[in-house]
Image (spheres, rainbow, N blue to C red):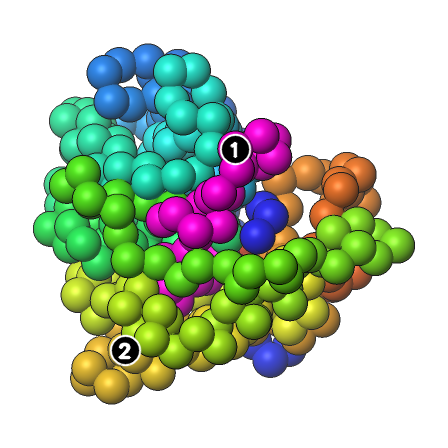
Amino acid sequence: MHFGREDPRPQPSIRTHGDDVSVRRRLRSVPTKIEVREPGVAGVYWVPDGPGPHPAVVALSGSGGGIPGWWGSLLAPHGIAVLAAAYFGIDPLPTAICEIPVETVVAAAEWLRRRPEIRQGRVGLIGGSKGAELSLLAASTFPDHFGPVVAIAPQSVAWFGYDPRGRVRGLSFRSSWSIGGEPVPFVPAVRGLLPERTDLGLRSVGVYLAALEQSEAVAAAAIAVERANGPLLLLSGGEDAACPASLMAEMICDRMAAHGRSEGVQRLHFPECGHVIIRPWPKGQMPPTPFDNGGTPEALDAAHEAALPEVVRHLTAAS
């Protein structure tokens, strides 16, 4: 997985929130960036202009790791305080996703809740792909800490580990996460099955589809999303070539329904979009990548314009 409505076109009714004057005033504000390097927390904090109190969110990277600071540039102008927090990929954190403590996200949330400009209550979570997996797992395991969750290319189970540099062997049969020092039950890769190489790069969706056929492992590794305080917002692309995010979004919705929590989840589906739905780069400037993420730049641009206002709306709701 690499990160990263039935009608993917932007809808005028969701482009603004409140009156046009207040939206333009908010978007003219200039957020403040603060580098955070404290025990247990590494990232960049984006503070919206104005006294607050502001809704707050912890933003998590996908399998590329590091600090996803671009979430701050997208969300802080809308009045959302953003702690873009690293959980691997920078010193002194691990270089691969292998038994990463979920408590890392809790530490980031506690750091945010100590800020005087933050709205009281639970903080939000946002992430794509592996960051979505970690967000859903953290919100389900530590529901007292987290409110609204946005999961882009959502994962319904905890997966095997991953090393973006390809240097650590055996991660396909070790958990990505740990809780209380113990590995989280996970779905392993199918032995001998590798990503497909296309003209656009590595296409890994088949690896994950095959792994989901392991019914016992899937049942043991299913994320207990019904325990999250929520609400959950799931964004999936119908042409995702990195992972079967659409299928897993359905699995999450089905699990929520089975536990009487249907009202706690909303899904936005973009049939022509790939793995990335909200882009960190400007329109028309997609950078080269070694991965085939699926979809087209045009579908991504349309999805981005439609989805971002809904993400803002979701994260600014009372936690």
Q: Is residue 224 left or right of residue 189?
A: left
Mark 2 residue crowding within 10 angstroms, few (<14) / some (14–19) / many (20+): many
Q: Is residue 38 visible?
A: yes
User: On residue 256, which mark appears?
Assistant: 2
**Label 1 sits on residue:** 168
Q: Which amino acid type is shown beneath numbered disc 1?
A: Val
Q: Secondary structure at mark 1?
A: loop
Residue 169 counted in the magenta span: yes
In this rendering, would 11 be left or right of 22? right
The span shown in magenta is 152-175
Could you say which is closer to the camera, residue 30 or residue 58?
58
Count of numbered labels shown in the rendering:
2
Image x and y of residue 307, in percent: 55, 60
Q: Nearer the viewer, residue 216 or 44?
A: 216
**For numbered disc 2, what is the local secondary structure?**
helix
Residues at badges 1 and 2 in contact (C-beta under 8 Å)? no
Residue at the image position 56 percent from the left and 71 percent from the top: 210
Residue under the point 32% across and 45% down: 177
Residue 86 spot, x, y in % from top left: 40, 29
- Left or right, 236 with respect to 282, comes to left
Front label number (1 vs 2): 1
* Residue 172 lies in the magenta stretch: yes
Query: Quick check: 130 above or below 45?
Result: below
